[in-house]
Amino acid sequence: MLEMIVASSIKVIIVMLAVLTGCAYATYMERKVVAFMQHRIGPSYAGPYGLLQPIADAIKMAFKEDVVPDKVERITYALAPIASFVPSLLVFAVVPFSADFTLVGRQVTGVISDLNIGILFVFAITSLGVYGIVLAGWSSGSKYSLMGGIRSSAQMISYEISYGLSIVGVILIANTLSLRQLVEQQDTILHWYIWKQPLGFLLYLTCAIAETNRLPFDLPEAESELVGGYHTEYSSFRFAMFFIGEYANMIAVSCVGTTLFFGGWQGPFLPAGLSVIWFVIKVFCFMFFYIWLRATFPRFRYDQLMNFGWKVLFPLAVVNLLVTGLIVLW
Amino acid sequence: MTIDAVIFVISAVVAIFGAAMMIAQRNPVASVLYLILSLIAQAVIYVQLGALFVGIMLVIVYAGAIMVLFLFVIMLLNLRGSEELGKPSGRVSRFTKYVITLLFFVELIFVIRGVALPPAPELVTNQPDAFGSVKAVSMLLFTKYLYPFQLTGVLMLIAVVGAVVIARREHPGELPDDTAAESTLAETPKEGTKA
């Protein structure tokens, strides 16, 4: 019992450090990649190639004045960044990062908690993430924040249904809800579920972008219309929590996408102890794709976004589910 | 006390605290937040009892979806607490309030005492693996409780259609009876001539 607690705690600490560092360098990566796509240089002053920029940003965030506007609902205002930050990190509790391996004579599992309904846990936690945004929008006492919060909740409710349905196809084929077993089933590149569920993958990708409020679905924080959207009135570290939460969410959906459709940590050449490298490479590709999209597409208009969600994605998801179900039965 | 009992007591206390605070709050947003707290604590209890699926579903459906809609409506109506909910009541109604609550409480005690409660079971946390799993729950849903399940589905469909009908009414506030239909008919030519 005690040994399990200690082992889990160590894993939690390692994963959290990795994720938070990942978030910091995701911002760096985003700025660099977008800069190259636009023929700019991007951050280049702090450290070689600007590599220390995220650290400089973090220090700046921490030491800025924390301005709280007069008309806010104090408690909810303080609660909102936490409600947005915590769920984005909780998802990583069930993501399998690497194969089981032996370290100094001990068997180490590559996941913090191997729930047998891991994928449902992911969706439960993701569905809680919307509260941070809604509460931030409502409690700020500013019309821009409120508009951002309302848009965001409408968007997340609309896309969450297709998001959930898009992965049911994979679950039907795999006949398990455990993320670890899903990865174990995709042992070679031909067994990756993206080949069996191409439409499901496209739906997952689209809905995941909408769920994480990224371009081209970043209506909640459309800066040309809403200043900063739901976090307009936040500054200093409270703002940083929203910011980190958003990037953690991006990494989380990339991890889940990798696990569901691209075989997670499975890959050739590397021993079990280093299989995490494959996982990181795959997640990195996902993140690159995200940033690529951001640099490419303009923002949707609000009514287009809702129409697209309900009249295109949702029927497609239902059809995908029906066809998959029939094939599995047959 | 075992660690199971500690977890149970903590989550039970949090669940009841959340439920009580939900009623006590004047600010509707705070009420929703306390209800979410209570729901999550209940989910913890389910998980601890081995019904992982039920617990997660509670979070997905209630805490994740229904409460977001509640919050959404409250935000849109922009209810900001006491002024919308009326002033604190006068002396007479305050008196009746307490009397009725007391009567109800006493009645509740008698009712509960009248029912022969089974003895409190031991806190069971080591269920067999299949207990409360997706498979076990769905087997029950699609075999033993198939008809109630289907009927619930139909009932929800009716509610959804009803909601759409009410929301799509052209003149909000009017009932879609014959007179309303006539009046809209009578109005259309006027608008036509104006244009």
Image: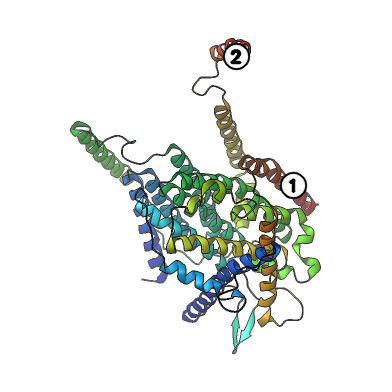
Vertical relation: A273 (above or below) B187: below
Task: From the image, state whether disc 2 or disc 1 is nearer to you.
Answer: 2
**Callout 1 amino acid:** Leu
Q: Measuring from the top left, give residue A307's x and y in whole percent.
A: 66, 40
**Of all residues shown, which one is farthest toward the bottom?**
A104
Q: Measuring from the top left, give residue B91's x and y in whole percent.
A: 18, 34
Q: CA distance from mark 2 to mark 1?
A: 47 Å
Local crowd size for mark 1, using a 10 Å CA cut-off: few (<14), some (14–19), many (≥20): few
Vertical relation: A278 (above or below) B48: below
Vertical relation: A65 (above or below) B153: below
Mark 2 belongs to which subunit? B
Quarter of the image where one finds residue A126: bottom right
In the image, what residue occupies the spot 74% across and 68% down?
A186
Q: Measuring from the top left, give residue B92's x and y in whole percent.
A: 19, 31
Label 2: state its secondary structure: helix
**Callout 2 amino acid:** Glu
The residue that label 1 is drawn on is: A322
The residue that label 2 is drawn on is: B191
> Which of these two is toward me, A31 or A271?
A31
Local crowd size for mark 2, using a 10 Å CA cut-off: few (<14), some (14–19), many (≥20): few
Is any atom of residue A203 visible in this view?
Answer: yes
> Which of these two is toward me, B133 or B194?
B194
Q: Measuring from the top left, give residue A315's x and y in whole percent.
A: 71, 43
**Of all residues shown, which one is farthest toward the left?**
B91
Quarter of the image where one finds residue A42: bottom right
